[in-house]
């Protein structure tokens, strides 16, 4: 029978316990390292997310600022477009009205005086008022307007003899004769498909354009 050595059993037991303790320490150390790594990764992710969030906020602020600038530029472009359109309409209206006025003045006889040539704001009518030495001269003037290409309808709205005017003949002798005060209304012709001539817009209608600094 082999003798039983109690000391050897204790030594083996101690070695086994030491081995188990060392293994437990290694497992605990590994868990601690894993936890530290996980915390480090989590902290790094948070820092990265915060940095990304800050960059996104800055980018959003730049985009919003650019949107405001674009809206301002669009408003300026629209204002300039409206202003150019207004100026073009004003130039066209002025040119056409100068042509109409010239057509009236060029047909005025020598013994006729015009007091007023005015356009209507509601339609394409022109009112002509003045004085003439005779009804025959007035009829000649009306016939000349009717034969022009600018007017489609010319009619007398009023005609009355009012007072006398003094004229001087070639011999230097003054003569007195009646004067006819008249008022005519003429309708403007318009080209096919074109709108009637409208009075030019007032200066207040011009949009103001602000330049960006």
Image (cartoon, rainbow, N blue to C red):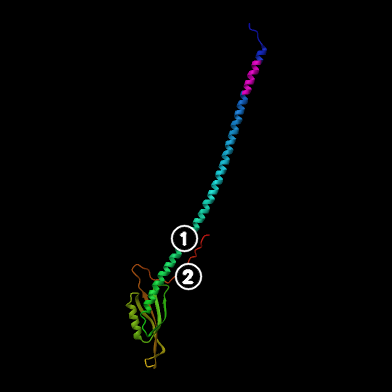
Q: Is residue 19 magenta?
A: yes
Crowdedness near tag 2: few (<14), some (14–19) or many (≥20) residues, C-alpha within 10 Å? few
Image mark for residue 133: none
Residue 174, image x, y percentages = 40, 93
The image quadrant of residue 98 is bottom left
The image quadrant of residue 104 is bottom left
Crowdedness near tag 1: few (<14), some (14–19) or many (≥20) residues, C-alpha within 10 Å? few
Instruction: Tell me the SS state at disc 2.
Output: helix
Residue 188, image x, y percentages = 36, 74
Which region is colored magenta? 11-22
Of badges 2 and 1, nearer the viewer stands 1
Marks 2 and 1, the one that precedes in the sequence = 1
Image mark for residue 77: 1
What is the total number of numbered labels drawn onto the structure image?
2
Image mark for residue 203: 2
Between the C-alphas of marks 2 and 1, the distance is 20 Å
Q: Which part of the image, by quadrant, shows the N terminus? A: top right
Please identify the residue farthest to the top as the structure is shown: 1
Q: Say which of 156 and 92 sits in front.
A: 92
Name which residue lies at 45% across and 64% down: 82
Residue 110, image x, y percentages = 37, 84
Name which residue lies at 53% across and 51% down: 62
Q: Is residue 127 above or below residue 165?
A: above
Residue 159, image x, y percentages = 38, 84
């Amino acid at each position: 029978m082999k003798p039983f050595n109690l000391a050897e059993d204790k030594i083996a037991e101690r070695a086994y316990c030491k081995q188990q303790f060392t293994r437990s320490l290694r497992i605990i150390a590994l868990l601690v390292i894993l936890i530290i790594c996980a915390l480090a990764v989590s902290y790094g992710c948070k820092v990265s997310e915060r940095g990304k969030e800050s960059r996104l906020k800055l980018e959003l602020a730049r985009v919003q600022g650019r949107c405001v600038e674009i809206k301002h530029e669009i408003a300026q472009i629209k204002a300039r477009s409206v202003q150019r359109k207004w100026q073009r309409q004003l130039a066209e209206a002025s040119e056409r009205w100068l042509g109409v006025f010239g057509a009236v003045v060029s047909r005025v006889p020598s013994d006729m005086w015009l007091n007023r040539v005015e356009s209507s704001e509601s339609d394409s009518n022109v009112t002509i008022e003045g004085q003439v030495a005779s009804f025959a001269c007035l009829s000649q003037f009306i016939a000349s307007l009717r034969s022009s290409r600018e007017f489609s309808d010319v009619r007398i709205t009023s005609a009355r003899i009012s007072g006398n005017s003094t004229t001087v003949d070639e011999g230097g002798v003054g003569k007195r004769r009646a004067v006819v005060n008249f008022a005519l209304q003429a309708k403007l012709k318009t080209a096919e498909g074109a709108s009637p001539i409208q009075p030019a817009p007032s200066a207040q209608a011009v949009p103001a354009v602000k330049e960006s600094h």
